[in-house]
Image: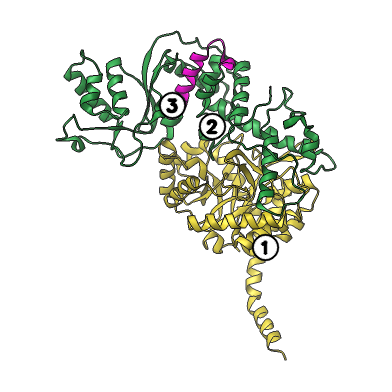
Chain colours: A yellow, B green
């Protein structure tokens, strides 16, 4: 679903994360980029240079907000002051949708600043979905939740991660920011087939896709965002676009950040892998009337 | 490092919940895991062998995290613990280069770990991570011995820079706003991003020198990213005792430090404390001439330091912490 209600019926193409080392290049050279993703928290400030830079970016580019600290899965209630600041930023950027992670990272008001994995239980899914609804109702903008990379699993879990994801998004009636690198990293760390995960995702809810690089250590993979995207992740991305359609795609590169040009070239590689999906989509569209007629026939049968 | 109770975090449950049926179960699990994460790492960067109340960490973590075919439960937790400590320590290194230079690598590293163990983050943004560092240095002077007062001065100054960088800016007062208002009744508020500091050492010069040295190092190496904990290289001479009155502020979205004479600073401090203009000017002392006062106010107005006082909001900001170190 390239454009759906979870990304405000937009078709944004391939975007980049807006990062400090690239500010000067972007503001001076004004490169042609489909859109930028900003980390909301970096701009949830009361004044100063961050907002000045953001306003200049907003004059030229489409911007989507991505958060790292809403912690939908935390047992804490949403923090009112946090929400107020976030809403102020939403009004400033006019982000068509907003994403944050399906994880927790704070408790009793203490923040770890990490994306900690959820226990995959029905009660946690219910609690998480309720919080997503509260946040969406307050912010008045569609929300997509992102699957995280994880390195630990809980004894109390009652289902797979993709079943949990489905349970949450259907209860919350929200979208998915599908991070295919995170699926790959977690699949290697927890011994599951990443394609099983993809098949378990409700495709009609995918509003955005993330791609990124990771690092392989002796006993596990770490989601480092400091490399180009690796082949298995590109393959997974190609399959994801076949299953879910060509959603707004964003390359995350957050550490050892190379030049703007290099990051942009890496992001644009995505075009190579979505060709199949475009063909697949146009074939699906072409076959839609026939399928509809066949369905109608079945329905009218005695 | 001796285990300390993190401020703000409620005590962990004795055992992990066996099932998650309620929100309270989820809270208990998350509280337990958070306690395990924020416990300081050992010198070899491994998680501590014992949890609260002396229980073996492996036993506690094994209650809620599954092992896999390559990693034990504790090893899996350790990935998160490393990440937690690295992220927060890097952040303090970024925000306190002057304090690091003053204390030296070993002492600074120990201070940061002790600070974070006692004061884990209580904000959704890492921007506020060092807000309680000056307070911690005062509470636990042993980490910065033999010169905690000087370390405290640098920490206050560096926190003021964070405030000046992205603190709130309110509508600037214009001369028209003040026209016809009698000084005896006129009260002005300072912009929230402005900090007034009386420092017993000229740490403004010192921090500038440290930043210039670090900038030169980056330029010389041509490396894209050293990470904040890369070696600092050449030593900058420590500041010698000498009282200065410094205003940390921003102008056209850039950070500045402005030194003021004692009378000018007293006037500004009195205004920040909520005094009327007439009383604030009197606080400047007898030697102050009307011409000097006029010139100071003209400069401060031009820098945009004054804003309207807000009804119903505290205009006396205690966090401005004007007093000098002991």
Mark 3 closeness class: few <14, some 14–19, many ≥20 residues within 10 Å: many
**Residues in magenta?**
B141-159
Q: Nearer the viewer, residue A111 or B276?
A: B276
Secondary structure found at label 1:
loop
Discs 2 and 1 share one subunit:
no
Q: Which residue is mark 2?
A: B129
Farthest bottom residue in view? A302
Q: On residue B160, which mark appears?
A: 3
Real-space Cα separation, disc 2 to disc 1, in angstroms: 39 Å
Q: Name the chain letter of the residue that bears numbered label 2.
A: B
Q: Name the chain letter of the residue that bears numbered label 3.
A: B
Q: Which residue is mark 1?
A: A202
Instruction: Name the residue at 68% across, 38% down.
Output: B12
Residue A39 magenta-highlighted: no
- The quarter of the picture where residue A177 lies is bottom right
Mark 2 closeness class: few <14, some 14–19, many ≥20 residues within 10 Å: many
Residue A64, image x and y in percent?
51, 51
**Whether residue A292 is visible:** yes
CB-based contact (under 8 Å), mark 3 and mark 2: no
Q: Is residue B271 depicted above or below B17 in this figure?
A: above
Real-space Cα separation, disc 1 to disc 3, in angstroms: 48 Å
What is the magenta segment's predominant secondary structure?
Answer: helix
Residue A294, image x and y in percent?
69, 82
């Amino acid at each position: 679903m390239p454009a759906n209600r979870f990304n405000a019926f937009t078709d944004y193409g391939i975007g980049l994360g807006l990062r400090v080392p690239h500010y000067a290049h972007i503001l001076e050279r004004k490169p042609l980029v489909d859109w930028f993703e900003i980390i909301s928290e970096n701009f949830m400030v009361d004044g100063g240079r961050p907002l000045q830079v953001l306003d200049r970016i907003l004059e030229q580019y489409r911007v989507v907000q991505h958060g790292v600290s809403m912690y939908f899965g935390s047992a804490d209630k949403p923090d009112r002051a946090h929400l107020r600041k976030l809403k102020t930023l939403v009004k400033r950027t006019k982000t068509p949708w907003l994403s944050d992670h399906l994880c927790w990272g704070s408790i009793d008001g203490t923040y770890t600043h990490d994306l900690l994995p959820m226990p995959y239980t029905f009660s946690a899914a219910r609690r998480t979905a309720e919080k997503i609804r509260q946040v969406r109702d307050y912010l008045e903008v569609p929300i997509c939740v992102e699957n995280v990379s994880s390195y630990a699993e809980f004894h109390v879990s009652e289902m797979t991660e993709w079943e949990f994801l489905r349970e949450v998004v259907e209860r919350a009636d929200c979208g998915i920011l599908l991070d295919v690198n995170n699926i790959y990293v977690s699949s290697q760390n927890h011994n599951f087939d990443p394609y099983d995960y993809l098949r378990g995702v409700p495709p009609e809810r995918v509003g955005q896709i993330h791609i990124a690089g990771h690092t392989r250590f002796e006993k596990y993979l770490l989601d480092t965002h400091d490399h180009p995207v690796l082949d298995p992740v590109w393959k997974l991305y190609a399959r994801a676009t076949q299953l879910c359609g060509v959603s707004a795609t964003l390359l995350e590169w957050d550490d050892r950040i190379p030049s703007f040009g290099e990051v942009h070239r890496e992001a644009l590689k995505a075009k190579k892998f979505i060709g199949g999906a475009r063909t697949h989509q146009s074939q699906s569209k072409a076959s839609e009337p026939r399928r509809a007629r066949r369905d109608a026939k079945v329905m009218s049968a005695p | 490092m001796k285990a300390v109770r993190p401020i703000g975090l409620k005590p962990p449950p004795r055992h992990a919940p066996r099932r998650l049926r309620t929100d309270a179960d989820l809270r208990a699990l998350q509280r337990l895991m958070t306690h395990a994460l924020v416990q300081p790492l050992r010198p070899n960067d491994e998680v501590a062998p014992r949890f609260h109340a002396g229980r073996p960490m492996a036993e506690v973590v094994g209650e809620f995290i599954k092992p896999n075919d390559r990693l034990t439960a504790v090893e899996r937790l350790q990935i998160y613990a490393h990440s937690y400590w690295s992220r927060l320590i890097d952040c303090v290194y970024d925000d306190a280069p002057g304090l690091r230079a003053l204390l030296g690598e070993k002492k600074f590293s120990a201070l940061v770990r002790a600070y974070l163990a006692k004061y884990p983050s209580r904000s959704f943004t890492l921007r506020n991570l060092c807000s309680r560092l000056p307070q911690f240095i005062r509470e636990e002077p042993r980490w910065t011995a033999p010169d905690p007062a000087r370390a405290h001065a640098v920490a206050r100054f560096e926190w003021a820079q964070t405030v000046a960088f992205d603190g709130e800016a309110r509508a600037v007062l214009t001369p028209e706003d003040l026209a016809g208002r009698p000084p005896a009744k006129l009260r002005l508020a300072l912009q929230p991003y402005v900090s007034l500091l009386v420092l017993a050492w000229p740490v403004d010069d010192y921090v500038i020198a440290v930043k210039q040295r670090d900038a030169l190092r980056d330029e010389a190496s041509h490396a894209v990213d050293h990470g904040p904990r890369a070696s600092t290289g050449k030593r900058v001479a420590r500041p010698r005792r000498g009282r200065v009155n410094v205003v940390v502020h921003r102008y056209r979205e850039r950070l500045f430090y402005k030194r003021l004479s004692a009378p000018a600073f007293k006037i500004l401090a009195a205004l920040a404390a909520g005094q009327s203009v007439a009383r604030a000017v009197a606080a400047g002392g007898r030697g102050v001439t009307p011409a000097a006062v006029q010139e100071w106010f003209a400069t401060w107005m031009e820098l945009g330091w004054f804003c309207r006082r807000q009804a119903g909001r505290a205009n006396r900001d205690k966090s401005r912490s004007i007093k000098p170190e002991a």
